[in-house]
Amino acid sequence: MAAGSDVAVSSLSCANCSKPANLQCPKCMELKLPREGSAFCTQECFKASWSSHKSVHLKPKPSSQGTGMTGEQISDSLNEGWLYCLKKGQARTPKLPYYDWTGTLRPYPISSKRIVPANIDRPDWADDGIPKVEPNSDLQHVVEIKTPAQIERMRETCRISREVLDAAARVIRPGLTTDEIDKVVHEATIAAGGYPSPLNYNIFPKSCCTSVNEVICHGIPDARKLEDGDIVNVDVSVYYKGVHGDLNETYFVGNVDEESRRLVQCTYECLEKAISIVKPGVRFREIGEVINCHASMSGLSVVKSYCGHGIGELFHCAPNILHYGRNKAVGVMKAGQTFTIEPMINAGVWRDRMWPDGWTAVTADGKHSAQFEHTLLVTETGVEVLTARLPASPDVFPWLHS
Ligand SMILES: [Zn+2]
Ligand SMILES: [Zn+2]
């Protein structure tokens, strides 16, 4: 949502800079607040004055049970969530925009941005939300061969990423909000001395992605409580010692029906089978063949719009790892390369749609989607799974019971 311009209010002056104003804050209009003081000359002035302007809006609603927040905090976090949507030029408000939702899931308010202590080393998007080195790097075209020193740092960061994801896995249960998962991820990351890579990456507002049911990927943690029977993917990326680690897993919330359990297990197997072929000399395009073969055998489909990626000092770089069959990925694996494989497998059709928040990718038919991801190193003889499960990793996948 942005400040509306459909009303003639040019006799008013901008609440920020006093120039003639013909945009009105939609929240003030909704609340029928006086027009003077709620008019702005440009979206820029509107955004710039938001932090002070918002205080003229809604006073606290009665406190809602069980959230651990006061009425004031809830009201604030609603406004913050709304502000985020404003930045994206789209709405994510309690009053939903028109959208042809594909399934039953809906967006909920987003809490305020979490703080990273000043002593933690930050990627270049941490302050203004814009990655600067990454899009202009040669490593978008050339696949880097990591040095032994870089590989050692990748090992450390990927191990931390695994421990952070495991911390999230341990708390998942019906009634927990995805925002509470984000809090666990954020705090475990900074406790390890890392920066949560997604935070403010292209102004993504949270420290991890949480993708529930029909969400394929990039779901934004919000105030929705997990329900018995949901599946939820948690995607964790950590920046530590100048390199990124990236992994995700899909978890069961309470009792999940047979169809979704099969979907999640098959997706896990797709990733395992893809990893098993990784070694020097194998074509990147083979990964998609292995995944497509296993998924289609089970009557499932493979998402085409999102792919795995090279990773290291850059969060996302060459190569693109395509997960579907008959893909045109170029190149051959070489020892010293690091990249992710992260198949997204759908119970129904492969096609995806985007929510109006500009991030949340959902299945076109509203059926469930699952994903697993590892960060890998190609070795002289095969592959090292840098984000591999640890002896202490929680026992959450029934098919791993020996
Ligand atoms: Zn990831
Ligand atoms: Zn990734």
Image (cartoon, rainbow, N blue to C red):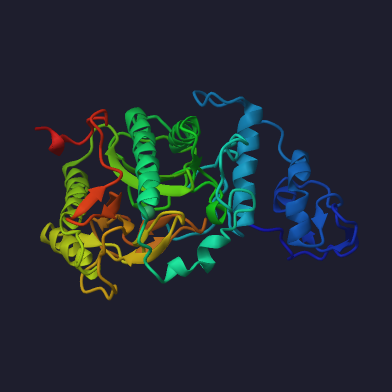
Establish if 147 lies above or below 386: below
Instruction: Residue 48 in the image: state x and y as whole percent.
Output: 76, 52
Q: Is residue 130 visible?
A: yes
Question: Quarter-wise, where is residue 348 in the image?
Answer: bottom left
Q: Nearer the viewer, residue 300 or 93?
A: 300
Q: Which residue shows up at 90% across the image and 57% down it?
A: 18
Q: Which residue shows up at 20% across the image and 49% down it?
A: 263
Which image quarter holds the N terminus? bottom right
Instruction: Residue 32 in the image: state x and y as whole percent.
Output: 76, 47
Q: Is residue 104 visible?
A: no
Establish if 97 lies above or below 393: below
- Of all residues, the one furthest to the left in this rendering is 402
Q: Is 121 on the left-hand or right-hand side of 235?
A: right
Instruction: Residue 116 in the image: state x and y as whole percent.
Output: 58, 37
Question: Quarter-wise, where is residue 323 in the image?
Answer: bottom left
Q: Is 153 on the left-hand or right-hand side of 21?
A: left
Q: Which residue shows up at 34% across the image and 43% down it?
A: 155
Looking at the image, how many numbered discs can be counted on the residues? 0
Q: Nearer the viewer, residue 280 or 401?
A: 280
Q: Nearer the viewer, residue 309 or 243?
A: 243
Instruction: Residue 337 in the image: state x and y as whole percent.
Output: 32, 59
Establish if 202 lies above or below 192: below
Which image quarter holds the C terminus? top left
Q: Is 225 on the left-hand or right-hand side of 71?
A: left
